[in-house]
Amino acid sequence: MKIYLAPMEGITTYIYRNAYHHHFGGIDKYFTPFIASKKLNRRELNEILPEHNQNLNVVPQILTNRAEEFLLIAGKIAGYGYQTVNLNLGCPSGTVVSRKRGAGFLSVPDALERFLYEIYEKSPVRISIKTRIGIESVAEWTRILEIYQKYPLAELIIHPRLQKEFYQYQPHAEAFEAAVAALPHTPLCYNGDIVSKKSYETLLDRLPQTDRIMIGRGILKNPALPAQLRQCTPECTCPKEPLKTESLKIETLKAFHDEIFEGYAAQMPGETPTLFKMKDLWTYLSESFAAPDKHLKKIRKASNYTEYHIAVNHLFRECELCPAPSSP
């Protein structure tokens, strides 16, 4: 089983990816938060610089609905040595969808097909796609799959929900099964609601042909999740890179947090932007702890580094880690 870390805007930055690789490891492929600027702004450039991604298998993700824009961005990314990019057709955000980008592009399949024809004909790199299965109805998936069948997708990552469902309700496993039948020669990756050993086993019971999965929130909430799914140890002799730990340990989590903080503090222009990034991360990381609310409130109220560190240290000292979840 290959395990990918999902791209999450503002969270899975190169600073997070490097810290994760250092303290946990076991990710076969990382995807950058989406790149949408033809000029590659400073934030986007930082995500793809080779020196920021050493020893990591990274795929840059592009968000656009204009072929000429995609090709310009892909060309610049190719200049940094990348051989594959990922097209974002999955983001359900209202602001993105309203501009017919991300999952919103699926609402205009004829335009999508013209777009894909041009980029697959002219792209200097291979193209994989991360997709939802439609906007309003699962019936839309049939037409979308017909389009995907026409192009040499390097990989298709499927989050089998509709855009309107965001991250709610049960994923439509039958949509993934339809893709397996329609695209027998395309590598297919399952994405959605893999948060525990139990949810992983349930997925494989329903979709036993799955050989690669993408996880986002599950890893952000429990960084040891890939190790728990694989049940590898540091002494593992399987051909994949051994994971650093199978059980989440307070010392490892603290060191992981500190490395991320130091990375942002060195990069950001002042305390406020760094604290903003760290508080965003705590939205997920707090799920690793039992009863963190009192301390989390203080973390969110912190207005400078001193207040932040006091609140964080109290949390790590006084809160126990949650046991590894056994159910979805």
Image: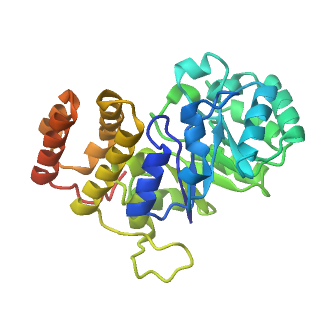
Q: Considering the image in quadrants, where does the N terminus appear?
A: bottom right
Q: Is residue 10 above or below residue 196?
A: above
Q: Is residue 103 above or below residue 198?
A: above
Q: Please identify the quarter of the rendering in which residue 266 is found.
A: top left
Q: Which residue lies at the image location 30% right of the left edge and 33% below the top edge?
A: 275
Q: Please identify the quarter of the rendering in which residue 75 is found.
A: top right
Q: Which residue lies at the image location 55% right of the left edge and 28% below the top edge?
A: 92
- In the image, is 291 to the left or to the right of 221? left
What kind of colouring is applied to the model shown? Answer: rainbow
Q: Position of residue 9 (x, y in %)?
A: 49, 35
Please tell me which residue lies in front, 139 or 58: 58
- Judge whether residue 245 can be spotted in this image: yes
Q: Please identify the quarter of the rendering in which residue 29 is found.
A: bottom right
- Judge whether residue 172 can be spotted in this image: no
Please tell me which residue lies in front, 238 or 164: 238
Q: Position of residue 178 (x, y in %)?
A: 70, 47
Please tell me which residue lies in front, 23 or 322: 23
- In the image, is 167 to the left or to the right of 308? right
Residue ranking furthest to the right: 121
